[in-house]
Image: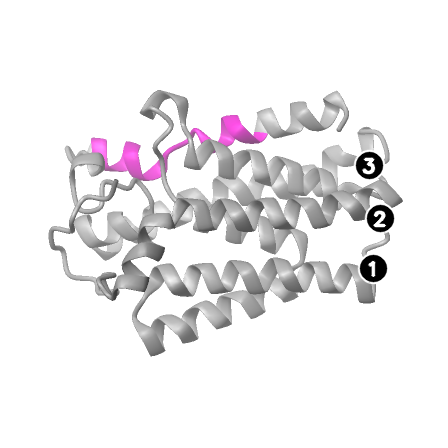
Amino acid sequence: MNYQKLLVILVGYLFGLIQTGYFYAKIMHVDLRSKGSGNTGTTNTLRVMGKKAGAIVFLGDFLKAFVPCMLMRFVFAKHLPDGDTDAMIYTFYIGLGVVLGHNFPFFLKFKGGKGIACTSAVAIALDGWIALLGFMAFALLVFLTGYVSFSSLYSVTQTFLLIIIHRFVWGYGLTKHGNIELVVLCVIITLLAFYQHRTNIVRLLNGTENKFNTKRHKQPKED
């Protein structure tokens, strides 16, 4: 990895530090870290503060990833080494940086959200059709099971697995190194989602995971 890509990740991390849930809740005199699951992402905001707050937080977290990803892919990547062919890779790097900043904000002791809204924005910027299939899978599974965590993890896995399959079957016109990096980045961002949902996975296996609803109520605080 060259220094330009490291710099792109850092720029993405700075965007990720825009903790929409934390700042919006602060404005409303709520500390999400001490409410519900203690998470500053969309789901906990929705459960603690209601539908409007949940929608605002999702939109903010989505846009903070989508905007820099699209700017990178269509404006800035061409000015970077191999950017004409590997714009998708630079897009992935800045998106990964946003997810890292969202999940591990230094000013919140590296405890942020779970990165699903940001990850969905990255997926759309990479391949909109595959991302749409992932969203459809997410919506269907939430409807059928009620488990947002399970639906999110399945959707992320499906999305980035399909991107890898697309790369091997049809290709994305990347350089040799770009093709390798695409697979590695798909694995990394998927593993990040699973790591952030580790306590949810334990509860899913134990049968104690909370099902989705929009009523405000107190959730047990996660580790």
Q: For this view, does 204 lie left or right of residue 135?
A: left
- Inspect the magenta stretch and tell me whether residue 16 lies in it: yes
Please, is residue 98 above or below residue 129 in the view? above
Q: Secondary structure at mark 3?
A: loop
- Magenta highlight: main SS: helix
**Is residue 115 in view from this perspective?**
no
Residue at mark 3: 83
- Tag 2: amino acid: Leu
**Is residue 64 in view from this perspective?**
yes
Please, is residue 199 above or below residue 211 in the view? above
Residue 171 versus residue 27: which sits nearer the camera? 171
The percent position of residue 187, horizontal first and vertical second, equals 62, 49
What's the residue at 57%, 70% (across, down)?
Answer: 133
- Inspect the magenta stretch and tell me whether residue 143 lies in it: no
Query: From this viewpoint, which residue is outermost toward the front?
Result: 206
Residue at mark 2: 174
Q: What is the CA distance from the residue labelled 2 to the residue labelled 3?
A: 10 Å
Please, is residue 151 above or below residue 36 in the view? below
- Tag 1: amino acid: Gly
- Mark nearer the N terminus (3 vs 1): 3
- Mark nearer the N terminus (2 vs 3): 3
- Tag 3: amino acid: Gly
Mark number displayed over residue 64: none
Which image quarter is the C terminus in?
A: top left
Mark 3 is surrounded, within 10 Å at the Cα level, by few (under 14), some (14 to 19) or many (20 or more) other residues, namely many
Q: Are marks 2 and 1 in contact (CB under 8 Å)?
A: yes
Residue at mark 1: 171
Q: Secondary structure at mark 1?
A: loop
Residues shaded magenta: 12-26
